[in-house]
Amino acid sequence: MTAHPFDTQGLDHCPFMPVFAPPQVMFVRGRGTELWDSDGKRYLDFLCGLAVTSLGHANPAVADALCRQAGTLLHVSNFFANPVAAEAAIKVNALLAEVTGHEGQVFFCNSGAEANEAALKLARKFGGRGRHEVVSAYGSFHGRTLATLAATGQPTKHEPFQPMPEGFRHVALNDIAALDAAIDTTVAAVLLETVQGEGGVVVADPDYLRAVRALCDERGLLLIIDEVQTGFARTGQWFGFQHSGVVPDVVTMAKAMGNGFPVGATWAKREVAALFHPGDHGSTYSGTAIATAAVSAVIDEMRRIDAPRLAREKGEVLVARLTTLPGVAKVRGRGLLLAAELAPGIDAKAVYTLLLERGLVTNAVTPTALRLAPPLTVTLDEIDEAVDIIANVLEEQTR
Ligand code: PLP
């Protein structure tokens, strides 16, 4: 059995900083929806490393692209061009142009937080000094860097790190009057998720998003949509904003974009992207050949399999099966980004632990709800197997 750093040495001697709770399982291998732990036990992954491995573990197209690129060229810095990044940028821009009707430009980075950092800096260039505030929603999650943490609408996460960088204010989601009241001459941008993933899989109302777009147009504000969790087909459309027909000025993405290889991106309409000049922003790892090889492979493969359609179809099946379970009060979300709100009195953390013991990976996204985000390639048999495991555990909880 593979040594388990948490079990064998205890947390005091753990090689990792104690920012995460000690994990219960060590995974050593995956294929598609399946994972195997260090004891050889098989699991179904209905979380995808938090909506990341949307094409499944060890996806052959992505693995091939990464292996070929690793043997050719990993990185050259932004002093020089590489053809892999150029190709990936063209593919990202083409995808965004298709769904927004606007030409734009892309900045590659390494994570969702960095994608949002670039968007926040664009907002500051857009508004200028004195008009640099960004309004986001309570319950949102935008990252762990100081600025993206400040944008995150979860005051308890701010507390240990006060004072927060200034320039951020929060309003209730789906309340257009509250947003209207929060906008004054110091506000440059509105930053929203179309489904608050970390906030509990809370869907932004399409009418609200359309009203937000109208308000931004009326007041001359940028609309930044954070698609880090919802992007790349997870909700049944390429991007979550498509469900409302709203066109953002800036879109941030990461997670599924590399299917597990760390990469993120900020896309902006061309006139907004033009606010950046050489030296305004950057990253040593912006557009490395290896990361952008993953991006190209993900986009090609998602187009080939029509990933948005898969998310819609499989999502419908999963919702239909879950809603029949007596222990499930309600299912919310879109596509394959779902939360099952459990019947009153059932503790989501306890259910999560039992599911894990029985070989199903999920997440207790709130004390009363389980988040389910299987790969978009999940099979109907795997959905049946997972729902049977959930049904058994919930039945024991309600007995
Ligand atoms: N934005 C959203 C909507 C997210 O869900 C997350 C992570 O869960 C982030 C930003 C931060 O992304 P990362 O952890 O890659 O920095």
Image: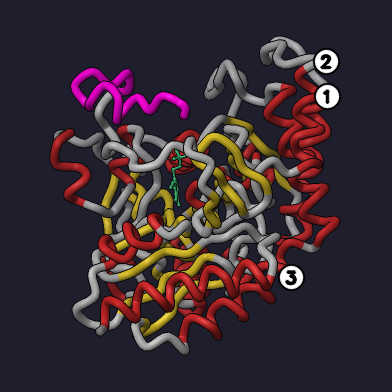
The answer to whether the residue labelled 1 contacts the one labelled 2, judged by CB atoms less than 8 Å apart, is: yes
Query: Which residue is label 1 attached to?
Result: 68
Describe residue 14's horizontal placement relative to residue 294 as left or right.
Answer: left
- Can the viewer see residue 162? yes
Q: Amino acid at mark 2?
A: Thr
Disc 3: CA contacts within 10 A as few (<14), some (14-19) or many (>=20):
some
Answer with mark 2 or mark 3, whichever residue precedes in sequence. 2
Magenta-colored stretch includes residue 200? no
Q: Quadrant of residue 88?
A: top right
Percent coordinates x, y for residue 362 in the rendering: 43, 59
Per the model, the C-alpha gap separating discs 3 and 1 is 29 Å
The answer to whether the residue labelled 3 contacts the one labelled 1, judged by CB atoms less than 8 Å apart, is: no
Q: Quadrant of ligand 1?
A: top left
Query: Which residue is label 3 attached to?
Result: 309
The answer to whether the residue labelled 2 contacts the one labelled 3, judged by CB atoms less than 8 Å apart, is: no
* Residue at the (30%, 57%) spot, across then down: 184
Of the numbered discs in the image, which one, if any, rests on residue 12?
none
Query: Which residue is label 2 attached to?
Result: 72
Q: Magenta segment range? A: 1-16
Per the model, the C-alpha gap separating discs 1 and 2 is 6 Å
Answer with mark 3 or mark 1, whichever residue precedes in sequence. 1
Describe residue 369's horizontal placement relative to residue 384 as left or right.
Answer: left
Q: Amino acid at mark 3?
A: Arg
- Can the viewer see residue 176? no
Q: Amino acid at mark 1?
A: Arg
* Image height of 93 relative to 334, above or below: above
Comparing 9 with 377, the one in front is 9
Disc 2: CA contacts within 10 A as few (<14), some (14-19) or many (>=20):
few
Q: Is label 2 in a helix, a strand or a loop? A: loop
Percent coordinates x, y for residue 121 in the rendering: 46, 35
Percent coordinates x, y for residue 160 in the rendering: 14, 36
Percent coordinates x, y for residue 17 in the rendering: 28, 23
